Amino acid sequence: MKSKLPLVYISLFLSMLFWGYTFVAFKFALESFKPISIVFLRLVISVIFLFGISLLSGKLQAIKREDYKYFILMAFFEPFLYFLGESFGLTYVSSTLGSVIIAMIPLIVPIAAWYMYREKLTMLNWVGLLLSFAGVIAVVFSGDGEVFVRLKGVLLLFLAVLSAVGYSLIVKGLSHKYNGFTITAYQNAIGIIMFLPLFLWFDAGSLMDVKPSAMAVSSLLYLAIFGSSLTFVLFTFAIREIGASRANIFANLIPVFTAIFSYFLLKEEMPGLKVAGIFVVLIGVFLSQVKSISLKKQKAPPVNYQFPA
């Protein structure tokens, strides 16, 4: 695995870079499309892209019958529950508070991964994880500090957090049987089926009247090809190689990249506290990946990963 580590970290860096810009792209897409339409259309475009690439390259694998339930559950967690929880949750709380709640994903995943797969982080890695989380708080609270809270929004955002944790754990098991293209392609295809009733009920009628701007269309394409396709392929590869715990710690880089993109493209401010928070996140992520990490895996072969009863 040593020879793959540089490729793993490049994959994680790129996936977080791509995900970081999705928050900016979503703002541009909202100028022409409604939230559910954005999610549904990005999944449709993503599936066309992924199945096309996978079929041409021969990377698309057949799913074994005993794994159908895991693919369905994975898609139910993400994109379905995660997008619903995050999108609607952010309408009831401030984006600042929402960012902090979402940033709890890397804190919860190691606990769940230890229970499921006996992944273990060292004390130094936990220090890095907590330090990076502190940096995220500094980044998101360095703006105007506006925070408004409604219990409904908090609960919805925690639904998104738990969904992301469940998704990571399922991907950990499936990644030892299937490649990233196969997992992501079927994940999004099943997601389309789950979102279809919501799309038909809320947005289908009004979508025909939309005259999207060029920026909205290009943003939608970015969300589909990068946000819902390539990022998941890269992230799945990283989870398979270094585990769900270590891979998810890199998620704390997402608000860092979002802050940088927002500064240059949306002209948002970059105060000193935000800059300091960015450096703290980087230091924390580095500490979380140092060589002293030890991973204890189940004795069973990787292809036999199953959920505990």
Image: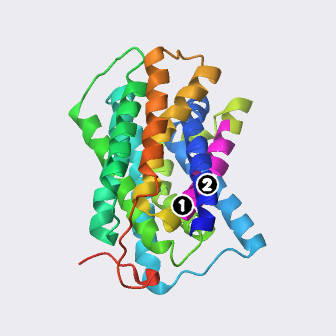
Residue 309 versus residue 249: which sits nearer the camera? Answer: 249
Residue 127 appearing in the image:
yes
- In the picture, the quarter occupied by the N terminus is bottom right
Query: Residue at 58% of width from left, 52% of height from top?
Result: 228
Query: Residue at 52% of width from left, 17% of height from top?
Result: 270
Residue 121 versus residue 202: which sits nearer the camera? Answer: 121
Provide the residue span drawn in magenta. Answer: 219-237
Residue 75 versus residue 275: which sits nearer the camera? Answer: 275
Please provide percent x and percent y for residue 11.
Answer: 61, 54
Task: Look at mark 1 in the image and give the residue it sits on.
Answer: 238
Please provide percent x and percent y for residue 165.
Answer: 36, 56
| Mark closer to the chain start, 1 or 2 | 2
Residue 64 horizontal side relative to residue 122, left or right? right
Image height check: is 72 above or below 303? above
Please provide percent x and percent y for residue 177.
Answer: 52, 79
Task: Look at mark 2 in the image and give the residue it sits on.
Answer: 11
Query: Residue at 48% of width from left, 14% of height from top?
Result: 271
> Dominant secondary structure of the magenta stretch?
helix
Q: Which mark is residue 120?
A: none
Residue 162 horizontal side relative to residue 66, left or right? left
Image height check: is 59 above or below 264? below
Q: Amino acid at mark 1?
A: Ala
The crowding category of the residue bearing disc 2, from other C-alpha atoms within 10 Å (few below 14, some 14 to 19, many at least 20), is many
Determine which quarter of the picture holds residue 51: bottom right
Whether residue 137 appears in magenta in the rendering, the answer is no
Query: Distance between the Cα atoms at labels 1 and 2?
Result: 7 Å
Query: In this figure, which colouring scheme has been used for the structure?
Result: rainbow
Residue 211 appearing in the image:
no
Whether residue 222 appears in magenta in the rendering, the answer is yes
